[in-house]
Structures are given as structure tokens and as C-alpha cells.
Image (cartoon, rainbow, N blue to C red):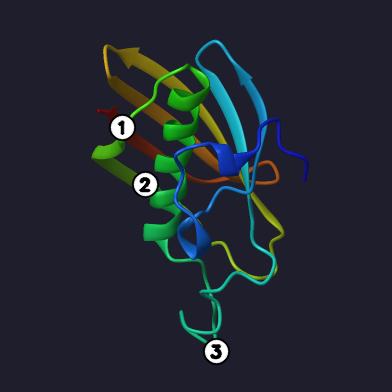
Amino acid sequence: MVSLIDLNETFLPVGQMRQITSVSAFYDQVIVCEMSLDHHWTYPMHFPNDPILPGCLIIEAAGQVTALWAWLDGQRGKPRLVKTAADFRAPAGPEHEVLTFRARIKKKRFLNFGTISVQIGDMEIATIENCIAVV
């Protein structure tokens, strides 16, 4: 995966807490990001005999997507997750290579409201609504 931006230059978390691995599209109110599922650090611990990616990390990744949109929009400061809601339809696990996050963002002053579709290939596995404040 090749990213449109150097994620190390943004205000995303580092180390294991960074969930987003690349940005493939950014325009107007849209951002598309990927999360590599190859050898994710949670699999040996999260149901070792039936590993799945924890939903809380998918929610975290969706927050990072909205925060990245804000960064690319020119917002600087400290991103803070204000609100989130998620609807999960199917699990993601080690047999999947990549999660794709397709987000539409609406900005109102320093608040960024995201509607994020989480997909494995063409299958939508979750929809997440969130709000990131950049203060």
C-alpha cells in the first residue's frame, strides 16, 4: 500500500495504536484509508483459537480516518474523539488482508463529523458515525 501522505507527519498515534496504514484518496468531503490486517498484533490475544479484530480498534481506526481528513483539511491542534456510534455486521480476521475505510466528513468550525463505511473487498462489515474535535 502506498499512502498519499506520510502518516508520521500527522497527529495520529504512533506504535501499536496507529491503525491506519495508508491514505488512498482525499477530495472535498471524502477520504479513503486502509488498515493492513496482516499479522495484526491483537490476533494472538483476542480469541487466540478464533482470532478477530476487536471492534474497539475498528472504531479507533475510523476516528483516525476522520482525524486524517481534518489534518489534510489544514486543521492543526489536538484531535479528540467527541462521539461515536457503530453498527457491526461481520468480523474481520487474519484471513483478510485489508480493511478499507470510506468516509464522508462534514466540518462545522472545529468539529468534524464522519460517516465511515468499513469494508473488506466489496462487503461492508461496519458503519461508524463519529465526531472529532481538533482543539
Look at the picture and state if 44 lies above or below 68: below
Q: Position of residue 108 (x, y in %)?
A: 28, 12
Q: Secondary structure at mark 2?
A: strand
**Which mark, residue 83?**
none
Look at the picture and state if 10 lies above or below 92: above
- Mark 1 residue type: Ile
Look at the picture and state if 96 lies above or below 6: below
- Mark 2 residue type: Asp
Q: Secondary structure at mark 3?
A: loop
Residue, far right: 2
Along the line of sight, the residue nearer the viewer: 53 or 4: 4
Residue, far left: 82
Q: Looking at the rendering, which quadrant does residue 123 occupy? A: top right
Comparing marks 2 and 1, which lies closer to the viewer? 1
Left or right? Give the position of 102 relative to 5.
left
Decide: few, some or many residues near mark 2? Use Cα within 10 Å; few <14, some 14-19, many ≥20: few
**Which mark, residue 49?**
3
Left or right? Give the position of 55 relative to 19.
left
- The answer for how far apart the CA atoms under marks 3 and 2 are is 25 Å
- Mark 3 residue type: Asn
Decide: few, some or many residues near mark 3? Use Cα within 10 Å; few <14, some 14-19, many ≥20: few
- The answer for how far apart the CA atoms under marks 1 and 3 are is 35 Å
Residue placed at 56% from the left, 37% from the top?
Answer: 9
Q: Which residue is mark 2?
A: 87
